[in-house]
Image: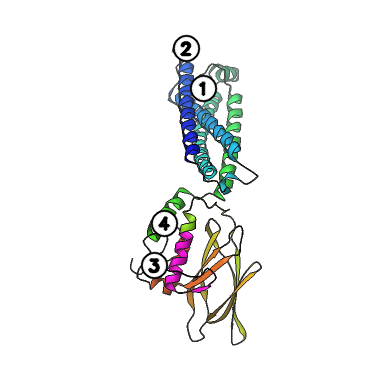
């Protein structure tokens, strides 16, 4: 695997250098072809540079796509692949598309500004001069004769490219974690490694504070394990919650569990004393809270492995926070609002 990454990185470096050189030579050639009396202004120079960078990024993206096709087996998207090399390539492709969006948006802004300026200039001229003004003064001074109609078509093409980039990024975002989420996972891993490992049964549902801290640490371990593939982020299991006390139904609700990555989900709920049934699809779990206690907040953690039975744990927020050094990972969603009492 290390050798594969070395080859990929080496080829990527060669490609990037070659594309940068080609883009520089193309810009230099365009400038050399300009007549002395028609040197481009700052806007034209920036447009040429942006077009060169966009071409370079597009070629680099195509090279990544070719590499992915060589490594990919089956129809599994690279973002969800069990192969860490494919997932790394998918992340790099996302970064390239983000840069392509930034470059294309800037290019569109400059083109639209030039079109507006040309239209305003034409409106001030006589009808007979309007045609000459548009055809004899191209918006971008290049070897080709760009008319206003050409520029409008170019703008439409760039809009179509942007729409395509956004759609691809949106699809990737349903699986791949963001840079902030990756940083949060790394921070949580560092914290989890300092925790004492408290054995607990994966089959045990109701946990105490120390076991709850360990359960969160297990999720951190999965999230930072490069061998565990990512899962789609737009899947939110629905948990049905029903509580009975003295034979009567006293609470009933449905809650969505938030995905945190790699088939792990969490939610903060408030439970009443009595017998509570948690149901997710065809699976159900029974919880009993003492009848003489008050309603309190609990944290649900759910692991849905691609193969095997689901693993659900439930522990009181107060019990977790009562621990001397609870594991409160940085990857927890903000609305969980879990803060150590010591911090």
Q: Secondary structure at mark 2?
A: loop
Between disc 1 and disc 3, the foreground one is 3
Disc 3 and disc 2 in contact, CB within 8 angstroms: no
Q: Which residues are magenta?
A: 195-220
What is the number of the mark on residue 261? none
What residue is disc 3 on?
Answer: 326
Q: Residue 321 location, x and y as percent?
A: 39, 71
Give the Cα distance between marks 2 and 4.
61 Å
Q: How is the image coloured?
A: rainbow
Give the Cα distance between marks 1 and 2.
13 Å
What residue is disc 1 on?
Answer: 140
Q: Of the residues under marks 4 and 3, which one precedes in the sequence?
A: 4
Q: Residue 169 location, x and y as percent?
A: 56, 44
Query: Please, is residue 209 above or below residue 184 in the view?
Result: below
Q: Is residue 289 visible?
A: yes
Q: Is residue 249 left or right of residue 329?
A: right
Q: Secondary structure at mark 4?
A: helix
What residue is disc 2 on?
Answer: 35
- Residue 196 in magenta? yes
């Amino acid at each position: 695997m290390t050798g594969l990454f070395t080859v990929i990185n080496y080829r990527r470096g060669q490609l990037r250098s070659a594309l940068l050189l080609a883009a520089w030579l193309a810009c230099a050639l365009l400038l050399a072809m300009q007549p002395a009396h028609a040197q481009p202004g700052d806007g034209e120079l920036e447009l040429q540079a942006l077009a060169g960078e966009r071409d370079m990024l597009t070629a680099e993206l195509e090279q990544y796509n070719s590499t992915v096709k060589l490594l990919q087996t089956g129809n599994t998207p690279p973002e969800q692949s069990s192969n860490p090399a494919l997932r790394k390539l998918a992340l790099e492709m996302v970064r390239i598309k983000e840069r392509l969006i930034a470059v294309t948006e800037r290019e569109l802004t400059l083109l639209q500004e030039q079109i507006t300026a040309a239209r305003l200039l034409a409106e001030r001229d006589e009808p007979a001069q309007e045609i000459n003004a548009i055809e004899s003064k191209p918006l971008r001074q290049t070897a080709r004769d760009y008319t206003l109609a050409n520029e409008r078509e170019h703008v439409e093409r760039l809009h179509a490219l942007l729409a395509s980039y956004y759609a691809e990024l949106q699809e990737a975002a349903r699986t791949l974690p963001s840079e902030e989420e990756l940083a949060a996972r790394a921070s949580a891993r560092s914290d989890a490694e300092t925790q004492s490992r408290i054995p607990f049964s994966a089959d045990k549902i109701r946990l105490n504070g120390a076991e709850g801290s360990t359960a969160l640490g297990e999720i951190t371990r999965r999230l930072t394990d490069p061998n565990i593939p990512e899962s789609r982020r737009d899947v939110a299991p629905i948990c049905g919650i029903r509580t009975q006390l003295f034979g009567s139904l006293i609470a009933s609700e449905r809650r969505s569990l938030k995905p945190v990555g790699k088939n792990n989900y969490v939610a903060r709920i408030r439970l009443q004393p009595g017998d509570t049934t948690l149901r997710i699809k065809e699976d159900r779990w029974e919880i009993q809270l003492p009848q003489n206690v008050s309603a309190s907040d609990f944290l649900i953690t759910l692991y849905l492995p691609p193969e095997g039975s689901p693993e659900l744990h439930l522990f009181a927020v107060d019990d977790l926070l009562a621990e001397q050094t609870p594991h409160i990972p940085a990857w927890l969603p903000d609305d969980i609002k879990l803060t150590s009492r010591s911090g």
